[in-house]
Amino acid sequence: MANTNLRIFSWNVNGLRAVLRKGEIQNFLEKQNPDILCLQEIKCKPEQLDLLEMGALNSYNVFWNPAEKPGYSGTATLVSKKLEKITIKDASISESLDLDKKEGRILVLDCDDFYLVNVYTPNSKPDLSRLSLRHDSWDPAFKDLLKNLEKDKPVITCGDFNCAHEEIDIARPKTNHRSAGFTDEEREGVTNLSNSGFIDTFRFSHPESVRYTWWSHWGHARENNVGWRIDYFFISNSLKNNLLDAEIYESQAGSDHCPISITISVTKKEN
């Protein structure tokens, strides 16, 4: 057996077809050459992509979990064709995560050494009408899903968690204390995930770094870097020594979110 390094990326593209039409995802794939890319908010079904759009993804096997509602939500994970034996995993999602079945919010892959969970966490909405659903149902059930998977082998989860965890993760914490994405209840969900043994890879690797992954369309927020860090990679504590790097790619255009990544060392089983 030998070790190999995997570069895993996550990106809320806010519309996969739009990012493909702009050529941004093609440029990104060519420049970064990810081994795996987890996408959130794809807003399409595979049959909606034309031949040119599908051709841009030719180097990858694509696993899909689109939303039932057209133009809404959904996740997809691109896996390099060089990687073998990666399959979709039936995660036996609980009733508290039933939202996933309609909105395509969770996609679990069995990657031999670990499970990879791509997630697009529900937004609490500006009027906080979904806050109780998230706090009382989604967050606890999602944590339980990860812990149940972890009984079998380590877990890597990534995606848009729709929450800035600490004040360092948001440009204006004081004025956003009761805003969706920075309520005490949402932050508690991320804290509970951390307390259950999952490591926030970027904060672990860069304890004092002030960087963001999402910017509002209003007020030139991105140009002024008035942002939020709401996209994460969490890993099982057992993978801590395998973590080599965690990064954010603020300069990547195409979405109101930017991509994030980890580099992790895994065991390659030789033939």
Image (tube, grey):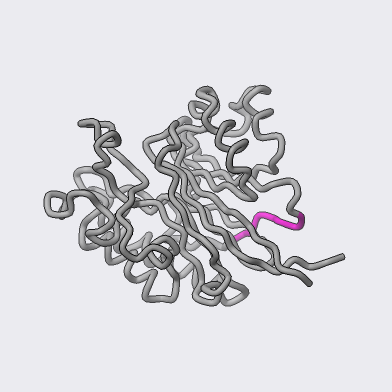
Residue drawn 30% across and 36% down?
222
Residue 103 can be seen in this image: no
Q: Quadrant of residue 91?
A: bottom right
Q: Position of residue 4 (x, y in %)?
A: 70, 63
Measured along the vertical axis of the image, is residue 15 above or below residue 169? above
Q: Main secondary structure of the magenta part?
A: loop
**Closer to the camera, 96 or 6?**
6
> What range is drawn magenta here?
84-90
Report the side of 198 relative to 17 (left or right).
left
- Total numbered labels placed on residues in the image: 0
- Decide whether residue 31 is among the magenta residues: no
**Closer to the camera, 36 or 223?**
223
Query: Looking at this rendering, what residue extends furthest in the right direction?
Result: 271
- Decide whether residue 85 is among the magenta residues: yes
Residue 127 can be seen in this image: yes
Query: Looking at this rendering, what residue extends furthest in the left direction?
Result: 175
Q: Position of residue 74 (x, y in %)?
A: 49, 42
Q: Quadrant of residue 182?
A: bottom left
Residue drawn 40% across and 51% down?
231
Measured along the vertical axis of the image, is residue 148 above or below residue 21? below
